[in-house]
């Protein structure tokens, strides 16, 4: 036995013609119920006649093609129209006549090619049918009756066309959402790469430049080269971690892994000091897991600000102040004689602009510019508790 909870999935795995067949069988069976005899669709004034040997074939021709109403909509409509015409001309007036508007709706919704030609052919075919029904009838049906029925058929086609346009609009909306999501993800990855690569490479370049002047001091030269090596290893580690996050097989519990662990800010400051930048570091409070993305963004703000200090004000005194509060994290990085990243002739513009967007996403505030004392100051207020 198949569990009722598994029926929907099992049903949708069937071929579309198999799923559409029960509707036609239901109409066919209903046409033979005595209570529904003579109560079907009637166009014209042809007298109702009892079912005969031809009835089964005619009703089957009307109902069974509904199985192909989505896979072969034009063929299904043609067969249903033929069965409907014979039904009306023979005077059966069965419930199976309801298959015609259903076929029109399905054709309007699923037909992809030659839609206008199909509509014109069906309209043209209705004219001789209406004339034949008028002649076979007793004259009780007026021209307005035939026109009204035609307009009802046009309405059925229009409903199908509306369903088709709605489905197309939804598909386009989903495509745009998917494209926007991919663009946002590419932008996020570019920012992460910018933060990781720019900071580490800048530190390595500065340390390597300093090593050129230490050939006469082997001990200091060895320390500087060791710092370059350590910086390169950290860069590789951070890049590997970022690439792991892009791996589809990477575990879903990565939110905490993206946030730098406690002590990384101090390591970042020490790395900058070894690159020759005097940094005064003050940290109040303790990072908590409930801070969410705020810790990561605060880390990136400090990282970008120190990178800019190394690039544009190497050797100038720099101060870093970070305060972890219960509801927010505040960051302030000031450097004497520093200039913003946008002042770089070949700069990408990703640095401070990217930080401003990151902080804004979490509902915080970000500013970067000259203070009254001439120092370049980067400030950020980052609400804590936002998901990663």
Image (cartoon, helix red, strand yellow):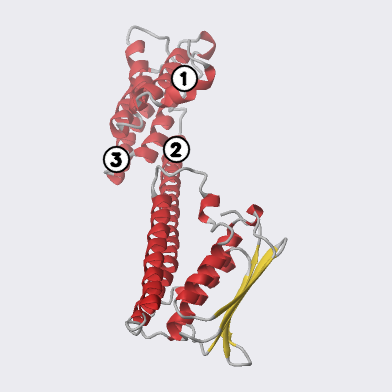
Mark 3–mark 2 Cα distance, whole angstroms, equals 14 Å
Q: Is residue 139 shown left or right of residue 283? A: left
Looking at the image, tell me whether mark 3 or mark 1 is earlier in sequence order.
1
Which quadrant of the figure contains the C terminus?
Answer: bottom right
Q: Residues within 10 Å of mark 3 (few under 14, many from 20)?
A: some
Q: Residues within 10 Å of mark 1 (few under 14, many from 20)?
A: many
Residue 71 falls in image quadrant: top left
User: Is 129 rendered above or below residue 361?
Assistant: above
Q: Is residue 168 shown left or right of residue 73? A: right
Q: Position of residue 264 (x, y in %)?
A: 54, 62
Q: Nearer the viewer, residue 24 or 200?
A: 200
Residue drawn where x is 52% and y is 66% of the image: 267
Residue drawn where x is 62% and y is 92% of the image: 373
Q: Nearer the viewer, residue 387 or 316?
A: 316
Q: Label 1: which residue? A: 95
Element class at badge 2: helix
Q: Residue furthest right?
A: 326
Q: Position of residue 56 (x, y in %)?
A: 35, 11
Q: Label 2: which residue? A: 156
């Amino acid at each position: 036995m198949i569990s009722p909870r598994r029926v929907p999935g099992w049903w949708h795995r069937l071929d579309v013609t198999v799923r559409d067949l029960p509707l036609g069988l239901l109409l066919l069976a209903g046409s033979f119920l005595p209570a529904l005899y003579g109560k079907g669709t009637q166009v014209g004034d042809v007298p109702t006649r009892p079912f005969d040997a031809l009835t089964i074939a005619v009703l089957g021709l009307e109902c069974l093609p509904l199985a192909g109403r989505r896979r072969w909509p034009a063929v299904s409509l043609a067969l249903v129209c033929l069965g409907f015409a014979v039904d009306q001309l023979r005077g059966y007036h069965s419930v199976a006549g309801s298959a015609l508007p259903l076929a029109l709706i399905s054709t309007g919704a699923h037909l992809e090619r030659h839609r206008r030609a199909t509509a014109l052919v069906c309209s043209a075919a209705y004219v001789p049918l209406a004339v034949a029904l008028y002649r076979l009838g007793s004259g009780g049906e007026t021209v307005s009756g035939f026109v009204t029925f035609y307009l009802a058929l046009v309405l059925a086609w229009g409903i199908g066309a509306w369903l088709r346009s709605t489905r197309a609009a939804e598909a386009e909306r989903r495509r745009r959402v998917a494209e926007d999501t991919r663009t946002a993800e590419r932008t996020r990855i570019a920012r992460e790469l910018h933060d990781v690569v720019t900071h580490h490479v800048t530190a390595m370049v500065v340390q390597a430049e300093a090593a050129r002047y230490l050939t006469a001091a082997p001990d200091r030269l060895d320390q500087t080269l060791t710092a370059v090596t350590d910086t390169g290893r950290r860069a590789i580690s951070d890049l590997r971690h970022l690439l792991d996050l892009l791996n589809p097989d990477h575990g879903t519990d990565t939110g905490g892994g993206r946030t730098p662990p406690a002590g990384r800010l101090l390591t970042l400051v020490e790395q900058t000091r070894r690159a020759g930048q005097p940094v005064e570091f003050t940290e109040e409070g303790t990072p908590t897991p409930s801070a969410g993305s705020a810790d990561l963004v605060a880390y990136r703000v400090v990282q970008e600000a120190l990178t800019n200090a190394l690039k544009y004000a190497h050797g100038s005194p720099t101060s870093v102040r970070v305060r972890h509060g219960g509801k927010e994290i505040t960051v302030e990085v000031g450097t004497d004689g520093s200039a913003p990243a946008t002042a770089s002739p070949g700069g990408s513009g990703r640095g401070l602009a990217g930080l401003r967007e990151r902080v804004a996403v979490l509902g915080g505030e970000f500013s970067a510019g000259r203070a009254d004392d001439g120092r370049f100051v980067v400030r950020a207020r980052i609400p804590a508790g936002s998901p990663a």
